[in-house]
Amino acid sequence: MQQSEILTSALFNLKKTAERINLKDCFFERLSSPKEEFKITLNPTLSSGRAIHIKAFISLHNDALGPSKGGIRMTPNVCIDDVVGLSMEMTWKTALIGVPFGGGKSGLCIDPTNITSADKEIILRSFIRGVKRHVGPEVYIPAPDMGTNEEDMGHIRDCISYSNGTSITSGCYVTGKPILLGGIIGRREATGKGVVYTILAACEKLGINLQDCRVAVQGFGNVGSVAAAQLAQLGSRVIAVSDITGGIRNDLGLNIENLIKHLKISGKISDFKDGEPISNSDLLTLDCDVLIPAASQSQITEYNAEKIKAKVVAEGANSPTSPDADSILNKKGVFVIPDILCNAGGVFVSYLEYTQETQREQMTLQEVELRLNNRMKERFIDVYKYSQNHTLSMRDAAMEIAVIKVTEALTARGYLP
Ligand code: GLU
């Protein structure tokens, strides 16, 4: 089996950080693998009457700072190593953004675009029934990730309260739910908006005028489409966007609002009439100021990094840049806003949802957006200052801050008898 690029890259970043900060071996060993990992086989019977088998995984990487937090990925090729690598990233992300959670992740090995929503619900309920003992406000709190959404989180919430025989749960078992079921206003847009807040902060530091900024966005899902729309609204020129079906380019700037409307009708970005088609790989190497890889992992590799022309790469996706590519981008002087900072807006607002539900509170959109904006800016500045003071890339600085914090938490907890 091919090695998981996500896990390889997560381990590489940890090892590099450990060497720089002289991390004690005992901590390095402990943080190199998850605290707990589970593999299960689901055997749901679909609405057609057909019984299927699905591999599913959970990795709870670390819980020194609080219960493990992280989304449920539903893709045909997800493997346990991907889930472990992603859960490790969640440990750094939650520590860095400053929420009282550790890192976790789930993976279900199935293509959600090939099944009906009724069957997706059956599969998710089967998953939650199978792993219920590992999910809870004090253990692991899932959320949406690639292939899952708000509606799915609503079904998870129902499955848990239904099995408890109650209408509500005591505390928050899952975030990213529909607002009606205890979800928080603004969660759906939070990751994309958070990406934009870090881009604004980067442009300010680098003296890039937002109005002159040409942006290319790979991935037009929950993260990419929100980021593109926000940046267009702020006056930047979004010159290319793409999704799994292909992309569209217009050097004068795409009308993102119209593109979103078009996508709802046509389902395909590439046949939008106000532009020329562009492939996903050509989009990455376009002449632009800001590149947002917001699709999937391992998109910027040693094969295309040299050709990247953007001044800023804002990692909307998890692990979109391989370690080799990262070092090429650094040598070229490209300013990379690392995933664990750039896309942390989602988990930050998940934290607000968690506190809201625990306290039976109701936050307004204004409160949520203000807190998200402030937190993203503060953490960007912390990482930026650290990178300047220690002559490190933004990724290395972010990793150092996060690993030190988690290690301090482990130390503060003391030794088990
Ligand atoms: N899946 C998202 C991430 O990778 C959100 C996680 C969460 O809100 O728990 O950050």
Image (tube, rainbow, N blue to C red):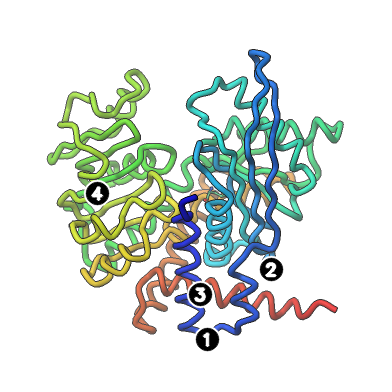
SS type, badge 3? helix
**Residue at horizontal 13 percent and vertical 41 percent from the top:** 251
Q: Amino acid at mark 4?
A: Leu
Task: Give the alpha-carbon distance from disc 3 to disc 4, as whole Å.
Answer: 29 Å
Residue position marked by numbered label 4 in the rendering: 284
Q: Using a 10 Å C-alpha cutoff, classify the residue at mark 2 as few (fewer than 14 neighbours), some (14 to 19) or many (20 or more).
A: many
Q: Is residue 224 left or right of residue 173?
A: left
Please state the horizontal and vertical placement of residue 319, each as a whole percent of the image: 43, 56
Task: Give the alpha-carbon distance from disc 2 to disc 1, as whole Å.
Answer: 20 Å
Which disc is residue 64 wearing? 2
Q: Residue furthest left?
A: 252
Q: Is residue 118 above or below residue 230?
A: above
Question: Is residue 363 in sight in this rendering?
Answer: no
SS type, badge 4? helix
Residue position marked by numbered label 3 in the rendering: 401
Q: Amino acid at mark 2?
A: Ala
Tell me which label, 3 or 4, sits earlier in the chain: 4
